Image: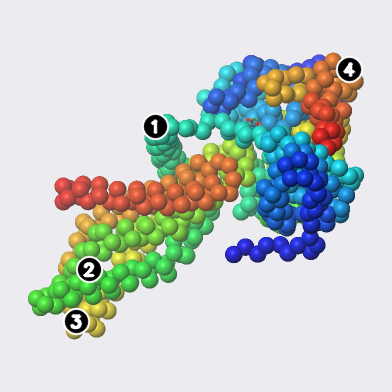
Amino acid sequence: MKEALEPIEDFSLNLAGEKGKEVILAISGRLALENLHRFRSELKKRWTEMYPAKLTVDLAGVDYLDSAGALALVQMESEAQARAVSFSFSNVHEEAQRIMGLIDREALTQPPLIPEKRSISLLEQVGEASQRIFADLVQMLTFLGELLTALFSALWHPRSVRWGDVLFYMKRAGVDGLPIVGLIALLLGLIIAFMSSLQLKQFGANIYVASLLAVAMVEELGPIMTAILVAGRSGSAFAAEIGTMKINEEVDALITMGFDPVRFLAVPKVLAAMIVVPVLTIYAIFSGLLGGLIIGVLGLDLTVYSYVQETKRSIELFSLVSSLIKSVVFAMLLAGIGCQRGFQVQGGAEAVGAATTSAVVAGIFLIIVTDSAFALALHYIR
Amino acid sequence: MPSSDKIPVIEVAGLTARFGDNIVFENVTFQVFKGEILVVLGGSGCGKSTLLKHLIGLYQPYRGRVLIHGVDINTDDDAQLRKLRTGFGVLFQSGALFGSMSLAENLALPLQEYTDLSADIIELIVKMKLGLVNLAGYENHLPEEISGGMKKRAGLARAMALDPTILFFDEPSAGLDPITSVELDNLIKSLNAGMGTTMVVVTHELESIFNIAHRVVMLEKSARGIIAMGDPRDLQQHSRDPRVTNFFNRLPPEAKETRTGNGQKNL
Ligand SMILES: Nc1ncnc2c1ncn2[C@@H]1O[C@H](COP(=O)(O)OP(=O)(O)OP(=O)(O)O)[C@@H](O)[C@H]1O
Ligand SMILES: [Mg+2]
């Protein structure tokens, strides 16, 4: 419930005259925002009692009037005029007159201006939306092109890269991400090992928990989960950082100083991610396998030695290497999309928020799509 | 005062700016001469910032072109573009300092990028530039640790890092108290006088205009372009265009009957 403002003092209405003929309404007391609602309902009641043909409103007793009160009076006047009642105020104080004079009567009835370009029909909206999606796609591809060019040129001229920044973002995205990546991978390992052990136990195939987990962690879960976590932690941070710089005109400043913002802002972040994400992926794989080992030893009576042996046996070098390559690609995509969404920011603070959200959503989407492509390609290469 | 032999440094020819269906201004043509302070003025929304962004190459012209030292600011030649861009400095409205870097790092950035000076000389230049804008000793402060006026001065120091021949200012006095803004104006004047830097300033502060402008270009929204050009005092006294004289005499665009008068009649 809203708490209404308590009136300090109140108004009173006094009617004199004949019903349906000339009526004088004397208002006295305080007419302000906090009793506006009651004033209007009171007034309506009185109106239906009297139906005057001519109404004079006597304001002699009004000792306080604010702009809301003045609005009520002005509205009363226009309502009376709308009902063809001849209307006048009498005994208006100078102060009340000034306040009522401030109210722009035209502004009350003026329809709102229509901001340019607001589509009306559904069809138009659908068209606009698809145009936007298309433009977005084009922008994304253009940015990807610029980014790749900048990355290649960074390979040719490693001295042109801002390595200080790269190190900074490696720490941010990598070192600072170790605890959460490790924890989640460990839990994931525990859960998968536990769930699969429930099934495999029935067949006395306890030892295969190790190989199941190893294959799952190395080939899919390790790289994907790490990439998704980094997209959430760092992709969004990249978007927010660049977006804020965009709003503060810092990106404009860079351009006018002759710097290429992609090279200056995006390349260090993307490079840092590409270096750090594979390392995090390996770390995640080990944490996950550790989780499996814990279940295997404590829950399935396997020895550490046999669990490790079985794990080693099921990990192929090919899948490990292809996983790492995959994670490098994920890193480029998630960091790239983060930067791109940042560069897209236009307007104010809420655009930065939208960019961070969109960086994470688009990042995860790209990761999943790319992973499917990898799965398909690897199936044929192997 | 600008030298008598007027050498155009910036040439704007037939410039049209357009966002979607919204034509902000069309067919704008003017020149900025070497060593002068040109003020771009006009009411809110007339396209001053848009014009400035066209001059510094942040927006592509819909039609027309902008030449700086005779080179198109939207040239495709990367090397030439870089050369052009390092030849001018821009002071953005908020200062646009890089938030993660100290003032010294902000100033050193263009020097490190475009010169092969050693670190100690760069440090010395940074100290000198900070001194020029009365910020000596603030090298190690972060932008967030200094006030708005100081940020603008630091932004100015950074814009001047490479000793550009042209400086652009977007609303230098916006958001500053009157005294700080006069200080900044005086700084602009003294830099112009001392180094002969050509300056283009967007502002609508009258005091500022009369204080610093050698020449003004006045834009108007409904005219979609320039309605007056020349010496501000001259325009104030001798212009025949009421829109111009109204601006210089601080009158609102079309002086309406005041609301109070209107309202009282109805009572
Ligand atoms: N990026 C943009 N996209 C679309 N329209 C724009 C953009 N920038 C400016 N405009 C439009 O151009 C017009 C001029 O804007 P501009 O910011 O140049 O005005 P201004 O003269 O600088 O005003 P002020 O004194 O209020 O800063 C406005 O109508 C604005 O809506
Ligand atoms: Mg502006």
Q: Nearer the viewer, residue A85 or B133?
A: A85
Residue occupying the point 38% across, 71% down: A183
Rounded to the nearest angstrom, the CA distance separating label 1 from label 3 is 61 Å
Residue occupying the point 25% across, 54% down: A322
Residue B21, image x, y percentages:
55, 24
Ligand 1: does it lie within 8 Å of the C-beta at label 2? no
Q: Is residue A40 found left or right of A205 in the rendered image?
A: right
| Chain for disc number 4 | B
**Amino acid found under the numbered disc labelled 4:** His
**Amino acid found under the numbered disc labelled 3:** Leu
Whether residue A77 is visible, yes or no, is no
Residue beneath label 4, please? B238
| Chain for disc number 2 | A
Q: Secondary structure at mark 4?
A: helix
Rounded to the nearest angstrom, the CA distance separating label 2 from label 1 is 50 Å
Residue B29: quarter of image: top right
Residue beneath label 1, please? A123
The crowding category of the residue bearing disc 4, from other C-alpha atoms within 10 Å (few below 14, some 14 to 19, many at least 20), is few
**Amino acid found under the numbered disc labelled 1:** Leu
Residue B169, image x, y percentages:
73, 35
Q: Secondary structure at mark 1?
A: helix
Image quadrant containing the N terminus of chain B: top right
| Furthest-left residue in this view | A203
Q: Secondary structure at mark 3?
A: loop
Image quadrant containing the C terminus of chain B: top right
Residue beneath label 3, please? A300
Q: Considering only vertical position in the picture, is A21 above or below A188?
A: above
Q: Is residue A330 found left or right of A316 in the rendered image?
A: right
Q: Nearer the viewer, residue A309 or A333?
A: A333
- Kindly report which numbered mark, 3 or 4, lies closer to the viewer in this rendering: 4
Rounded to the nearest angstrom, the CA distance separating label 2 from label 4 is 87 Å
| Chain for disc number 3 | A
